[in-house]
Amino acid sequence: MKVFKQLNEIGKTIVIVTHDPQVAAACDKTINIEDGKIVS
């Protein structure tokens, strides 16, 4: 996550797909998908 944060700070877009709530909590923005549909 540290490397991802550093890359993001210099202007790179990072997309992370995870089922881990701790990883998601470390992200600036999250998009949740249920049954193939965006729910938030």
Image (cartoon, rainbow, N blue to C red):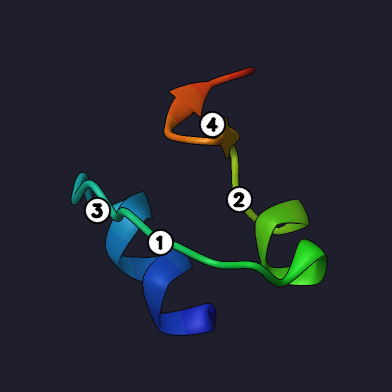
Name the residue that disc number 2 marks.
27
In this view, 1 is above or below 5:
below
Disc on the earlier residue, 1 or 2: 1
Horizontal relation, residue 33 to residue 13: left or right? right
Q: Residue at x 59, y 39 (%)?
A: 28
> Toward which corner of the image does residue 8 lie, by quadrant?
bottom left
What is the CA distance from the residue labelled 4 to the residue labelled 3?
Answer: 22 Å
Q: Earlier in the sequence, mark 4 or mark 3?
A: 3
The answer to whether the residue labelled 4 contacts the one labelled 1, judged by CB atoms less than 8 Å apart, is: no
Q: Which circle's residue, 3 or 2, is located before the other in the chain?
A: 3
Residue shown at the point (61%, 50%) measured from the top left:
27
Q: CA distance from mark 3 to mark 1?
A: 17 Å
In the rendered image, the vertical position of residue 3 relative to residue 18, given as above or below: below
Q: Nearer the viewer, mark 4 or mark 2?
A: 4
* Secondary structure beneath label 4: loop
Task: Give how far apart the Cα atoms at labels 4 and 2 are.
Answer: 10 Å
34 vs 8, nearest the viewer: 34
In front: label 1 or label 2: 1
- Which is closer to the viewer, label 3 or label 2? 2
The kind of secondary structure element at disc 2 is loop
Q: Report which residue position mark 1 lands on.
A: 16
Residue 10 image label: 3
Count the labels in the image. 4
Identify the mark at residue 31; answer none if there is no mark: 4
Q: Which amino acid type corresponds to the residue marked 4 in the rendered image?
A: Ile
